[in-house]
Image: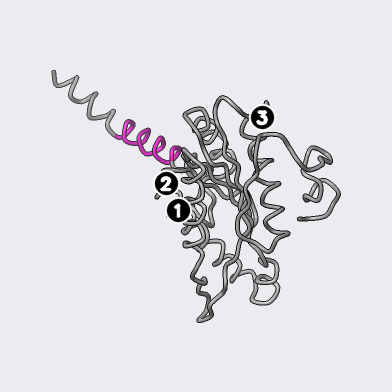
Amino acid sequence: MIELLTAAAAGVPLAAGWSWHALRLRRRITDARRDPLTGLATRAEFEERAATSLLRGPRAVVVLDLDGFKHINDTLGHAAGDEVIRAVGARLTAWADQHGGIVARLGGDEFAAVLPVFSYADLDWTMDGLGDHFADPAAFDGCEVPVRYSAGVVWSHPRQGPASGLAGWLRRADEAMYLAKRSGGGWHLAVGPDAALPTVNGRREGRSGSSGVAA
């Protein structure tokens, strides 16, 4: 009996060490799936969760891009730009949580979300509510920095969608975002799953990586 207790006691530090190692590993995996600036999901995490969400019922797929973000960086500096990105992340999180949705930072000043939406009336209410979260400027170094956006949205349904699934819906939402930006901001609805704008190198024409011109 004494020998068993001695052996068990000797194993406690080893077990504790493994537990600490496993906890640290889990934290590293979690951190890798979160954007360090906003805490939002990264593209990989978002795509995994959003693809599952799209199978569960009608959803709004949203792509959002900030307007005038380069001007903020050029005039106030990148620290101001980072603060705006953080503020936008917090606002989008609050908006997505309100509707039971998923939101991510895709990179730079571009974000995406998938939210349960069951009618066009519900879609209007959801997207108009997005504007409420952007009504106030972001604060930086005693300054108020206006935060403007262009968003594209498409209403998806599990039984009617592009063959490419989430990627196809994001492409349609991206097209709508481009039209919203050309119209001065706000949000624009794309109707149907089929791409409406020309594709170059697998991306919407005008997109960075297609013709070399950023939209």
Q: Position of residue 78 (x, y in %)?
A: 64, 69
The answer to the question of whether label 1 and label 3 lie on touching residues, with beta carbons closer than 8 A, is: no
Q: Which mark is residue 99?
A: 2
- Cα gap from disc 2 to disc 3, whole angstroms: 24 Å
Where does the image place residue 152, in percent across and percent down from the top left?
63, 49
Left or right of 150 in this view: 41: left
The one nearer the camera, 182 or 120, is 120
Q: Quadrant for residue 11, please give it.
A: top left
The answer to whether marks 2 and 1 mark residues whose Cβ atoms lie closer than 8 Å is yes
Q: Indicate the secondary structure of the residue bearing disc 3.
A: loop
Furthest-top residue in this view: 1
Q: Amino acid at mark 2?
A: His
Q: Is residue 109 magenta?
A: no
Residue 95 is labelled as 1
Q: Specify whether 48 is left or right of 72.
A: left
Pick whichever of labels 1 and 3 is earlier in the sequence.
1
- The residue at which mark 3 appears reads as 162
Scheme of colours in the image = one colour
> Is the C terminus in the top left, top right, bottom left or bottom right quadrant?
bottom right
> Compared with residue 101, is residue 70 higher up or lower down, i.e. above or below?
below
Chain-order first, disc 2 or disc 3: 2
